Image (cartoon, rainbow, N blue to C red):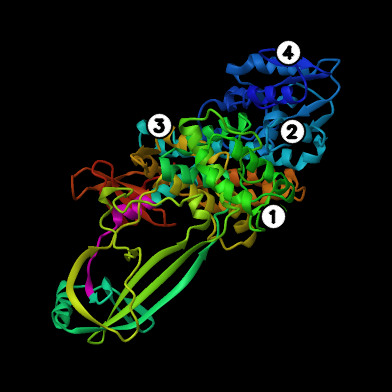
Amino acid sequence: MAEKPSMGRALAEALGVTGRGRNLLEGNGLVVTWCVGHLVEALNPEGYDPAWKPWRWDRLPIFPEAFRYAPIAQTRDQFEVVARLLNREDITDVVNATDAGREGELIFDLVYRLAGCAKPVLRFWTSSLTPEAIREAYGAMKPGEAYAGLRDAARSRQEADWLVGINATRAQTLRMRRAGPEEGVWSVGRVQTPTLALLVRRELDIRTFKPQPFWTLRARFAHVNGAYEGRWFKEQEGQTQERFAHEEEARALAARLEGKPGKVKSATGRTEKKKPELLYDLTALQKEANKRFGFTAEGTLALAQALYERQLISYPRTSSRHLTEADAQKAPHWIKALAQGQLAELQPFLDELRKRWPVKLDKRFVNDKEVEDHAALVPTEKPARGLEGDELRIYDLIARRFLAAYFPDRVEAKTTIITEVEGETFKTSGTVVKEEGWSAVDPPHRRKKAEKADPAEGEDDADEEAEGGLPAVKKGEDVDVASLHPKEGKTTPPKRMSEGDLLAAMQGAGRELDDEALRGAMRDCGLGTPATRANMIETLIKRAYIERKRNVLLPTEKGIRLIEGLPSEALRSAELTGSWEARLERMRRGEEPREAFMADIRAFVSGIVAELQDAPAPQVHGGPCPKCGQPLRILPSTRRGEFVHRCMACRHVEAGKPTPAETGSPH
């Protein structure tokens, strides 16, 4: 049983199963069939008990004794085909050939159990759909019970998300309805809510940011070998000062130094070597495609999945950026496929590599301990032909990143000049690329200076670095001060997040946690998994919590209200996901009992429901908004124990703590 029709057909072809069929293929002693993604879904609360249909406090929390499932209506026909095959008398063994990961394991397990099957299961596990890889994996299958920990982790993740989502969403919605019947549904989830919180906190930081003016002083120096610019700085008590708080200070210094001679205080050069970038995992690929092409995370995943099903790249839903020793042995076949494929631009690099062959991949890229379910994204031994458009762009990224791993370091010459005028110092920096190395194969993306996430974010006063060489100067040489010009700048707020920025934040969420075990789990898992982050962003958009605007993601007023109004820090914190992922990882390894995990989840849900029931709903404040006169609402702040008064008409916000009379009864 494969996860998708295209994958099922690839399996059948590689294993010699001929014939044609819409739902299955049979021959050579095998029957190959497939799901269409998930064929089975969890029942809603009313599917267990009609009394659970109304949204009422006295019906919460909802804890099914045993979780129940039903076929998804749109794909019920395919479920019935698979269920009949699972129970066909002449079929003796079942091969689970869904995607080799937690979600694939769940897809198979739900169908297998709902069909009432009890036949022996073998697990087919591969990171590539080429015929060679399929036949190799088919000859190395293990009993399904070898993956019992993975199955338990998959079921526990799904059930825990159901319990938190159903109960917390109903409790938060009932709480918000106290403020008025128009409030609608307020969806809350284990991953979606802390993800939304990342965007909301950034947006609130931007809205409350007050730009501060400052001035810098730049000088242009004339030397016999050429001109260069420097920026004034001063070292004081271990701190570097580069700005003036007042324009008068900058202009006074410029006037004092005008016409004075300068001298090169120091001229230092150093060589920096930059190693090739690690190979792509899914999140790194999604971030790069968003940065270069503006692709959404979901769009990049769809393109990578299509390339995988065409047998051109390895399994895309990977969280690893390394290869195993066994993978490294196959790498020459991948290089051969690139040489035979359509990427003519890579031919000069392949020719160069051929001259240096044999070349082994550096240990930075090959590490069995860094690979769990799947290795990094790489091209396969099948040459790419006929690719075009966006699929070609994604394939080109993956191919270049892989090929660049075989090339030497990029070498840059960094030059720093310190120029002194009347005891005042100016700094000049420059970089020259001496050897492109790997970056000739996989050129880094250069963001244009004018390109900003939002034009309203203000002037970026990053320290400028000369592009190209600086004139050759030596310590002690004289220079003329050709000009001095004060320049006004303003401090800028944090930038709004692009989709790539949010993916990076989701991937790294929780790294600030104190607990070492939690940090370890978050390093690998973050908020969600590589396979689910794209879908989570789309879910937040569909639920009107965030929106895409040009190339950034913005929280809506509804999204801001949810995060501002949630009294439970656990629901919006990365720590919750970190602790769960750490335990689910232990469960996958057989070190954590499923029963204990689920018991703790039920206890957590009970606490959340009680906390939301006791928390005051946003109420109307007695006083009017000082800006527009409309009534203010009281909302819990993102800082525990504090509240804000917010105008829902003009969005004016006042910090403060409401009195009990202002908050009203929590019930």
Residue of label 2: 132
Type of amino acid under label 1: Asn
User: Does the magenta segment cover residue 215?
Assistant: yes
Amino acid type, residue under disc 3 in the picture:
Gly
How far apart marks 2 and 4 lie (CA) works out to 21 Å
Q: Looking at the rendering, in which quadrant would you find the N terminus? A: top right
Q: Position of residue 491 (x, y in %)?
A: 28, 62
Q: Position of residue 564 (x, y in %)?
A: 39, 48
Residue occupying image coordinates x 60% and y 50%: 353
| Mark identifier at residue 367 | 1
Mark 4 crowdedness (10 Å alpha carbons): few <14, some 14-19, many ≥20? few
- Quadrant of the image occupied by residue 69: top right
Who comes first in sequence, dot 2 or dot 3?
2
Q: Earlier in the sequence, mark 4 or mark 3?
A: 4
Residue located at (29% from left, 80% from top): 419
What's the amino acid at mark 2?
Answer: Glu
Q: Residues within 10 Å of mark 3 (few under 14, many from 20)?
A: few
Residue 321 in view: no
Judging by the rendered image, the residue that carries numbered circle 4 is 19
Q: CA distance from mark 3 to mark 1?
A: 50 Å
Amino acid type for the residue under numbered disc 4:
Gly
Residue at mark 3: 184
- For the point 60% across and 58% down, the residue is 519
Q: Which residues are magenta?
A: 202-221
Find numbered disc 2 in the image and state the secondary structure of the residue it sits on: helix
